[in-house]
Amino acid sequence: MNKKEIEYKIQELKYEYVRLQNDLEKLEFVQGKLSPLEKQISEIEVELKALHQQLASL
């Protein structure tokens, strides 16, 4: 991946992260099942960290 592709992927993941955080807040309010969303958020955090490291090494 080149720098622009990595930056674009980071932006996409940030938007997805925010969306999932909002969904998580709604589920907390209605006492829904949180673990699937928490798992997705955790996976995004790991992917973002890897992309930031990859970007820094360019």
Image (cartoon, rainbow, N blue to C red):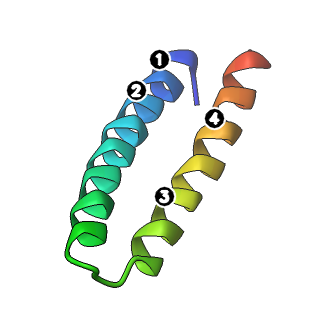
Mark 3 lies on residue: 41
Q: Is residue 32 left or right of residue 46?
A: left
Query: Whole-Å distance between the Cαs marked 3 and 1?
Result: 23 Å
Front residue of 34/20: it is: 34
Residue under the image location 35 percent in, 84 percent down: 33
The residue singled out by tag 2 in the image is: 8
Amino acid on which disc 2 is placed: Tyr
**Marks 2,3: beta carbons within 8 A:** no
The three-letter amino acid code for the residue at tag 1 is: Lys
Q: CA distance from mark 4 to mark 2?
A: 10 Å
Q: Is residue 45 left or right of residue 5?
A: right
Q: Nearer the viewer, mark 4 or mark 3?
A: 3
Q: Nearer the viewer, mark 4 or mark 1?
A: 4
The crowd level at tag 4 (other Cα within 10 Å; few <14, some 14-19, many 20+) is some
Residue underneath mark 4: 51
Give the Cα separation between the discs numbered 4 and 3. Answer: 15 Å
At 48% from the left and 22% from the top, the residue drawn is 7
Q: Are marks 2 and 1 in contact (CB under 8 Å)?
A: yes
Residue at the right extreme? Answer: 57
Which residue is under mark 1?
4
Choose top left, top right, bottom left or bottom right for residue 12: top left
CA gap between label 2 and label 3 equals 18 Å
> Percent x, y for residue 1?
58, 31
Name the amino acid type tagged 4.
Leu
Q: Secondary structure at mark 3?
A: helix
Tell which circle, 4 or 3, labels the residue nearer the N-terminal end.
3
Are the residues flagged by discs 4 and 2 in contact, CB closer than 8 Å? no
